[in-house]
Image (spheres, grey):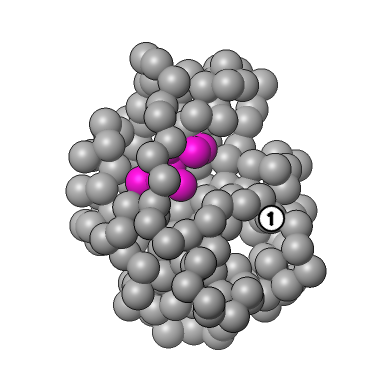
Amino acid sequence: MPVIRYQKTLEREPVVAPAANVRLRTFGRPHDATAWLLLRQGALADQIACGRAWQLADFRRELLDKPWFVPGHFWLAEPMNGLPPRQLAGSIALQLDDSNTAVVHWLLVAPEYRRRKIATNLLQLAESTAWQQQRFRLRLETLSTWQAACRFYHALGYEEA
């Protein structure tokens, strides 16, 4: 599947508009990795070919073991509607490198929480953090077949790189 690379240059600090019925927090609670794996499975269920479900080793390889990974730059959106604390509505990770660029990874929203501004809220939080760290250019990737994601990034000012 062809990958599309997007980029955006920030001209001012983004305002983080709160999404309804979720609380954003950073990664680090005991069951966060397991909850993220369930989020990934649900969020990508209709997008990826059937294969084996990811395990904790996959999560570690994809995120925790990356040299850029910082728990404070990996946000989780928790539902505030009394659902079990291990369920997540969304996530996003931000990589800060040595240049003035930040890279967005793993923006996910569970299907039952889509169209509630959660993805926008998570992306604004990542952009604001990048701005505060003096990273004014952001990059991200998605698959060309994920047309909803492509439209979303374009609507938020991202252009194909």
User: For the image shown, how many numbered marks are present on the structure?
Assistant: 1
Front residue of 28 and 20? 20
Q: Position of residue 118 (x, y in %)?
A: 39, 54
In the image, taking residue 72 as reference, residue 148 lies left or right, namely left
Query: Badge 1: how crowded within 10 Å, few (<14), some, or many (20+)?
Result: many
Answer above or below: position of 50 versus 6. Answer: below
Q: Is residue 125 magenta?
A: yes
Stretch of the chain drawn in magenta: 119-126
Front residue of 27 and 95? 27
Front residue of 35 and 16? 16
Residue displayed at 54% across by 64% down: 78
In the image, taking residue 48 as reference, residue 23 lies left or right, namely right
The amino acid marked with disc number 1 is: Phe
Q: Is residue 41 magenta?
A: no
Q: Position of residue 29 (x, y in %)?
A: 75, 63
The majority secondary structure of the magenta stretch comes to helix
In the image, taking residue 25 as reference, residue 69 lies left or right, namely right
Residue bearing the label numbered 1: 27
In the image, taking residue 81 as reference, residue 32 lies left or right, namely right
Q: Position of residue 25 (x, y in %)?
A: 62, 52
